[in-house]
Amino acid sequence: MVVKRYLDFINETLMVSLSFREVVECLAKKNNNKVAELLSMLIYNDFYDDDENINYVGLDKEVNMFSYLPKRRRTTNYDDNMYSDLRVAIRVGRGVKQIVDKVLPMVNFKGDFNITIQKYIRGATNRDTENFILFLDKETQLLFKHNNILKIKTTIGDEEVNIEGCINSRYSYHDGHSAYLFTVDDQTDSYKILNKNTTSASNDHPTPDEPATIELTNDIKITAADIEAFANEYVSFIRQNKGEGEIEEVKSWHIRKWYDSVNYKSRIGKLGNSCMSGEDCQEFFDIYTANTEVVSLLILKRDNALVGRALLWKLDNGEMFMDRIYTSFDSDDNIFINYAIKNGYMYRNTSTSNPKYYKDGKEVPIEKLTIKLYNYDFDYYPYMDTFMFLNMKNGILSNQRVGEDIYDANIRTLHSTDGKWNEYEDDEDDY
C-alpha cells in the first residue's frame, strides 16, 4: 500500500459549500450516521487530497444529487470553483462511494511510526489531566485518526508503556514540522513516565524530548448499505428543508381516498406495490373510517399526489404508534421517522419478516400492544401489518396472540389480502 507522508496532506481537505457542510453535520450529530461522521472529519481535517476529482462539493437542484467541479476545470480561487458554471452533478450515493473508497485504505492502516513527546505545562489547567505535545517531523507518515483518539506506546528501559488519549488541536512550527496537543486522563497510571526529564513547552519553538511510538489500529467498516442509508437520509433532509416533507394527518373517509392508487404520484416502491392500493380494496377500510378516535393516516404529498403513508394508532396505554411506512422512494421513510421522533411516537420498521419497534430513535422490546375499538364487526377487513389480531368478543385489536389468546376462537387474524380474515372459511364451516 502506498502511504503518503504527512506533509503531503497539509492544506488539503474536502472543500464543500456551507449548505452541504450543514447537512453533513446535522446527519452526523442527529442521526449518528457513520458516513456523515467520516465526511465531517474530511471537511475539517487535512486528510483529503485537493487534487481528487470529486471536490468543491455543493448542493444540487436535484435533491438526490450533489455538484462538484472536476479537477481539470479548477482555478486557484475557492469562490470561482464553488460557483463555476462548469460544475457537474453526481448521485449522492455514487459520489460518496468514490470519496469513501479513496480514504478508507488510509483510515484503516494498521501500524506504528515514531514520534517525540514533550510535557506541555502552559494550558494544563485541569488537575485531572496531563497535556503533552506530540512532534512529527516531515518524514513521518501520519495517517487518518478516528474520533481524535490515538494510542501511544513507549519503552523506558525494559518497560513498555501504553497510553491512550485525545488529540485536542494541531499546529505547525518551524522547518515544516507539525505538533499535536495530546491530553491523557490521569486514570492511566503509566502516563507519569512521560514526565521524566521533560521541560515546559514554548509556544514559539518547542523542542522535542521523549521518544515514543504511536500506534494506529483502526478498523472502520463502511458498507454499501451504510452509503445507501446516508444517501436516503441526505435526500429526506433536503426535501424537508425545501418544504417537500410536510406530514399531514387525515381521518375518516380521507383514509379511504389516500389508500386508492389513483391518488398516488407514481406506482413504484413500497407504496406502489401495496396490496391494499387497488380500487377493489376500497370496501375493506371500514375498520379505519369508523374508528376515528383511535386511528388516523399520516400522508406525505407532492404536487397534491401521495408519495407516502403510514397509519397512526392510539394505544390503550395512551401511547401513539406509527405503523409500517409505505413510500414510493425509500429516502422518504426518514421523513416519517423524523416526524415520529419529533412527536414522541412509537414506530416500527418497514420489514415484513423482521418487524422492530422504536422510540426516540432507539429500538424498544416488542410487547403486546392493544387498541380498544368501538366499531369492529364488518364484512370486510384490510390486510393489517402490525395489529392483525381482532377479538370479536370485546373489540380489542392487538399485535400479538399470546396467553389465552392462542386458544381463543373469538379472535380473527386480519392478515389476508382478499378482504376477509385467515379463519374465514373455518368460521363459515361452523354454520
Image (cartoon, rainbow, N blue to C red):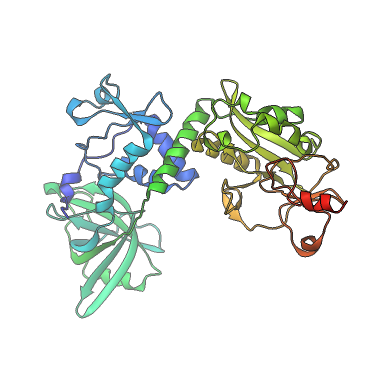
**Residue at point 62%, 41% (across, down):** 340
Nearest to the observer: residue 174 or residue 259: 259
Nearest to the observer: residue 121 or residue 38: 38
Image quadrant assignment for residue 281: top right
**Residue at point 25%, 45% (across, down):** 102
Q: Residue 249, can we see it?
A: no
Q: Residue 214, can we see it?
A: yes
Image quadrant assignment for residue 276: top right
The N terminus, quarter of image:
bottom left
User: Residue 80: image x %, image y %?
Assistant: 25, 22
| Residue extending furthest toward the bottom | 158
Nearest to the observer: residue 268 or residue 344: 268
Question: How many marks overall?
Answer: 0
In-image side of 406 versus 102 (left or right): right
Above-or-below relation of 333 to 153: above
In-image side of 430 versus 423 (left or right): right
Above-or-below relation of 55 to 223: above
Image quadrant assignment for residue 193: bottom left
User: Residue 18: image x %, image y %?
Assistant: 37, 30
User: Residue 105: image x %, image y %?
Assistant: 25, 52
Nearest to the observer: residue 127 or residue 37: 37
User: Residue 17: image x %, image y %?
Assistant: 34, 30
